[in-house]
Image (cartoon, rainbow, N blue to C red):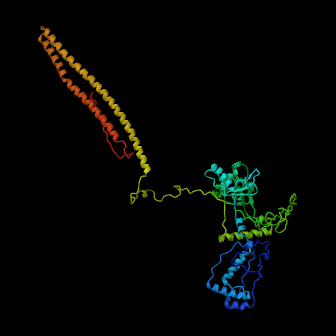
Amino acid sequence: MMSPVNRNQNTVSIPPLMNASNIYQSKSPNISTPTSRPQIHSQNQASVSFSPAIRRQLNDSGENQQLQHRKKHRSNDDVRTSHSSKQLGNNNLVVPPRDNNSRVENQQQHQHSINNHFPLVHLKRAVSNNLPYFYLEFKEELNSDNLPSSAKIIHELNKFFYNKWIPAFKGFTICSLIGKNRFKIGTNDKADYSKLINTRWPDTIDDKVVEVIKPNHVPDCFAFVVRHIPSNIPNDQIAKYIYQVFNSAVQFTEISRHQNNNQSTKDYRFTITDITEYYTALELKRIAIGNQLLPLTQFKTSYKLTYCTKCWKIGHMRFECNEATKCRICLDNFEENVSHQCKRIAKCAQCNENHWSLDNKCQIIRQYKQDLKHAVEQAVTNGKLRRFYPQDIKKPFVNTGEDFPVLVHSTQSQIPTAWNNQKKENSELLNELQKINGSMNGLRSDIEVLGNQLIEGNSRILSQDKLIHQQQQNIVLVINQFQIIIKSLTEAMPELDNKTKRKIEKQIKTLADIGSKIPPNEMCTHSKEQATSHRIQTDTITTSATTTTDNGGGNGNEKSSMSIETNDDA
C-alpha cells in the first residue's frame, strides 16, 4: 500500500504529452471500507454525497517536491472532525471528511494541476529575457593557478570601460568560467550592450592575451512590430517605409497567423540595431506606412521551452539527461572518435514523426506550449513569478513653463504677504558690496591723483607769487628813484615856468600814489595766506577720500560728502 503524503503540497510532474490521460491520472486508489460509511454519515451528513479526497500526489518523487503551499488555519470543528476521523482511520483506513467548500476547492486545484505540472525552475526559464553573452577566451594554455579569477576579470573590464564611457557604463552583471580558459560575461543594460557590440575590447587582461567573441545576432528585445498593415501593401514597400524612419532597421519578417490567413491586415516585424533609434522608436509609438499612421509596439518573445540538447526531449536539461548524445536531425547516437554522417531526414524525439523535435507541427510541442503558458500566467497571478526585462533608461522629467501655466498672473504678485519673509541672498549682497568697494577704490585713486595735481598747482602758484612780489618791489624802487631824479632835475632847472613845474609835481604825486597802493608787507601776507588755503583744501580732499573707503570689509553703509572749492586769485 502506498503511503499518503501531505495534501497541501503542490503537485509536480512532467508536462502532458499528446493529451494522454494516463499521465495525469492518480496512481493511488481511493481507500474506503463499507464499515466506515455509517460512522462518517453519523458525524457529517454532507460528506456522503462526495468522493473522498485523493491522498497521494500524481508524482511524489523527491526531486519534484519543491513547491509547497502554506498550511491553512483550521477551526476547532475541523480539528475535532479530523481527530475523530483519524481514530476511525486507524481501524478502518477511512479518508477524513471535509466540508463542501474545501471539497470544491480541492477539485478545482486538482483540475488546474492537470495542465500545470512544471517546476518553478522551468517557469523562470520560460520568462527569462537575458541579453546574449560575450565570451572571453585566453589564447594561452593556462592552468588553474595562472588563470585570473572572475572577480579580477570583471574589475579590469569595468575599469577599462568606466574610463571610456564615464559615467554612462553601469558595469557587467555576470562573469563565470565555462570550459578551461573561457569566461562568459554578460550585462542587463541595453545601452551598455549596444556599446559593447560596437566598441573595441582590451587585448590583454592581467598581462595575458585574450580574444573576445561577440554575439552574431541581434536579440529579440530590440525588435518592434508594426500592427494592422493593409494586406495589399507588398512587403518590400513596407521595408522601404520602415527604413526611411529607422536606418538601422534589419531582419524584416512578416508575422504569420496559423489560425486565419484571410485577413485584411497583417503585422510586420523588424529589429533596430542603433540604441538611439531604439529609444526614439519607444517614444514615437507610431509609424507612417503609406498614408496611415499605424501603431508601433515592442515585440514580445514567446516562452522559452525546457528541452535537452542530448536526447532533444522536452521537460529536462542536458545535465539531467542520462541518455547518449544524439543528432538533432536524425536522432542517431553519436559515437566517440567517429565522424557522424547525418541522414538528413528529420525525426521528432517526442512523437517519432518526420519533423524537427521542437517543430510547432508536433502536437506534443503545441500542447506543451499551451500548458506552459497557462502555468506561467497562473504563477504570475499568484505572485510566485515575476517577469524580468532588461533595463531601459528612463529620462528625467523636465518641467517647462508651458507645460503647467500659472492660473493667476498679475493679481498674485500684488497680494501682500502676511510676513515679510523676503530676504536677499547673501551671495547677491556680497557681490553688490564687492562692486561698491571696487568703485570706492577707484575713486580713492582718482582723489589721490587730484591731490597731487593740486599740490603741484600750489607750488607753481607760490613760485609765481614770489616773482610778482619781487617785481612789485622793483617797481616801488623804480618809482622812488624816478621821484628823486625828477626832484633833482626840477631843482637844477630854475628857469622852468610854473606851469611845467605843476605838471612835474602832478606826475610825482601820481608815482607816489602808485607806490603807496602796493606796500611790501601786505603783498607778503597775501601770498602766504593764499598758499596756506591751497594746502588746507588738499588735505581736506585726501581725508574725505580716506573716510569713504570700506574699513569694515566692504559694507558700503557710510556716506561721505566732499566739496572742493578752488579760488585762483592771481
- Position of the C terminus, as image quadrant, is top left
Residue 60, given in percent of the width and then of the height, sits at: 74, 75
> Closest to the observer: 193 or 402?
193
> Closest to the observer: 480 or 542?
542
Q: Is residue 17 above or below residue 555?
A: below
Task: Give the mark count.
Answer: 0
Question: Residue at left 36%, top 35%?
Answer: 448
User: In the displayed structure, does residue 267 sit left or right of residue 447?
Assistant: right
Which residue appears farthest toward the top when viewing the image?
495
Residue 390, given in percent of the width and then of the height, sits at: 66, 59
User: In the displayed structure, does residue 398 sit left or right of residue 462?
Assistant: right
Q: In this orientation, does residue 68 appear? A: yes
- Position of the N terminus, as image quadrant, is bottom right
Task: Tell me the quarter of the picture where residue 397 sits.
Answer: bottom right
Q: In this orientation, does residue 290 appear? A: no
Q: Is residue 260 above or below residue 458?
A: below
Residue 388, given in percent of the width and then of the height, sits at: 66, 63
Question: Residue at left 39%, top 38%?
Answer: 442
Residue 40, given in percent of the width and then of the height, sits at: 70, 89
Task: Tell me the quarter of the picture where residue 178 sits.
Answer: bottom right
Which residue appears farthest toward the front when viewing the image?
145
User: In the displayed structure, does residue 522 sit left or right of residue 46?
Assistant: left
Q: Is residue 29 above or below residue 356?
A: below
